[in-house]
Amino acid sequence: MIWSVAWRNVWRNKLRSLVVVLATAIGLYGGIFMISLMNGMVQQKIDASIDNEISDIQIHNPKFLEDESVQYTINDPNLVTKALDENAEISVWCKRIKATGMASTAHSGNGVMINGIYPEKEIMVTAIHNLLIDGSYFIKKSRIPSILISQKLSEHLQAEVGKKVVLTTAALNGETAQALFRIEGIYKTSNNMFDEMNVFINAEQLEQMVAPGSILISEIAIRKSEQADLTTLTNTLKSSFPQLSVLSWQELSPGLMAMTALMNQFGYILIIIILLALTFGIVNAMLMVIMERTRELGMLMAIGMNKKRVFLMIMLETIYLSVTGAVIGVIISMATIALISRSGINFAGWAQGMESLGYSAHIYPVVETGFYVFLGVMVIFAATLASIWPARKALKLQPAVAVRDES
C-alpha cells in the first residue's frame, strides 16, 4: 500500500517531478556518453596496438629488448615454432628480423626500425596490409626489392610509391650495410609515432644486409585463439621456453594497461560526482515537498500513521524520482551508444593531435555491462542518501502544529 501511495505522491506535482527526473536523466546521459567515448578511445588504441604493432604475445632473446640489436636473435627458432604449431590455444604466429637503421632519399633521412618480415605469414598476424593508402603489399617482383613505408615517413622523405629509398644499418661483422629499395606501398595507422619509425621489407633482404647466408629471427609474434586466456597462455609459453623472453602485450606496453585502469577509475569518479550533484537537487526538491505538505503529513500522523511509515513513504518518493530519472538516462544513453557505435564519431578537426598521441580520431563509443551494474547500485545508494534529510524533516513535524499550518 505505502509503495503505491508514494508513487502517486510523486506525480501530484507533475512539473516539479518531471524537472527532477529530466535533470537526473540528462546528467547521467551526459556522464555515460562521455565515459563511453573515453572507453572507446582507449579500447581502440589497445586493439590497434595489438593488431598493427604488438600482437598478443612476443618472444625474443632476453637481451633484444634492452637495445634491440640485430645480434640478439632467437636460438633454434624452428624448435620454438614447432611447439607453437602444436599448441591449440595459438591461432597464428609469424617470425621477424628487426634492425635499427636509417632510411634516406635525395631529400632527407630518418632513423627507422627496419622490420624484416615474411609477408605471407605477417598478413595473418598484423593488419598493416589493410592500412595501405597507396600501392600494394609485396606483390611486385623486380630487380630492386620492395619496401613499405608510412605516409608520415613518405612526407618526411618526400618519396612516393615507385620512388627509391636507401636503407642503412649495421651488419653483424661491424661494417655498415646499405641497400636500395623501391617503395611499393604506403600505409597509415592511427599512431604517428609508430608510423614514423617503422618500415617493412622482406626478411631475406634484411638478412642479406646484416649477415649474408644466415637465417636470423629477432622476434616471434603470436595471436591467440579466441577462447584462449592470454595470461594462462603466456605463462605456459614462459614455462616451455625459460631461456627466452615471453611477454604479453600487457607486459610489453604497461602504459596501455595503466591508461585502461585510469580511464575506468575516472569513469567511476565522474559518475559519483554527477550523482552527488544530482543528490543535492533531489534533496532540495523533496524539502520543498515537505514544506508544501506540512498540513497533510500532520493529519496523517494525527490519525495514526506511525513515524516509520511516514519515513518510508518520503524515502520511497525520493527513490522513485531518482530511479525513474536514472532509468530514462540509461535507456537513452544505451540507445545512443548502440546507434553511434555502428558508424562512430569522427573528430577530424583534432585528428593530427590525437594521432600524434597514438589515438584514432574516429571513435566508436563503448560501455561495459559491469559499469551499468555499478551505476545501478550507486543510483540506489545516492537516492537512499538523498531521502534521509527530507524524511527526517518530516518526522520532526508535530501533528498538533502541522495540522494548523496554512502554508
Image: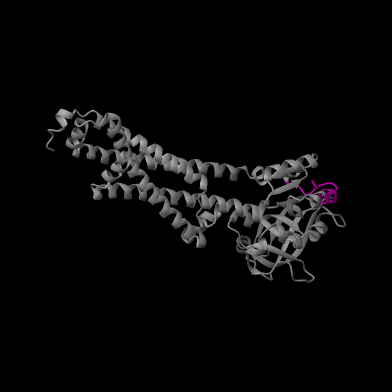
Q: So how many labels did they put on this image?
A: 0
Where's residue 284, x and y in %? Answer: 27, 39
Where's residue 342, x and y in %? Answer: 51, 61
Q: Can residue 358 be spotted in the picture? A: no
Residue shown at 40% from the left, 37% from the top: 381
82 with respect to 36 (left or right): right
92 with respect to 337 (left or right): right
Quadrant occupied by the N terminus: top left
Seen from the viewer's position, the closer of residues 389 and 136 is 389
Seen from the viewer's position, the closer of residues 267 and 388 is 388
Q: Can residue 44 be spotted in the picture? A: yes
In the rendered image, the vertical position of residue 242 relative to residue 351, given as above or below? above
Quadrant occupied by the C terminus: top left
What residue range appears in magenta? 68-82
Residue shown at 30% from the left, 44% from the top: 7
Seen from the viewer's position, the closer of residues 33 and 298 is 298
Seen from the viewer's position, the closer of residues 144 and 294 is 294
In the rendered image, the vertical position of residue 405 relative to residue 4, given as above or below? above
Q: Is residue 75 magenta?
A: yes
Residue shown at 73% from the left, 56% from the top: 115
Where's residue 154, x and y in %? Answer: 63, 63
Q: Is residue 405 magenta?
A: no
399 with respect to 109 (left or right): left
Q: Is the magenta stretch mostly helix, strand or loop?
A: loop
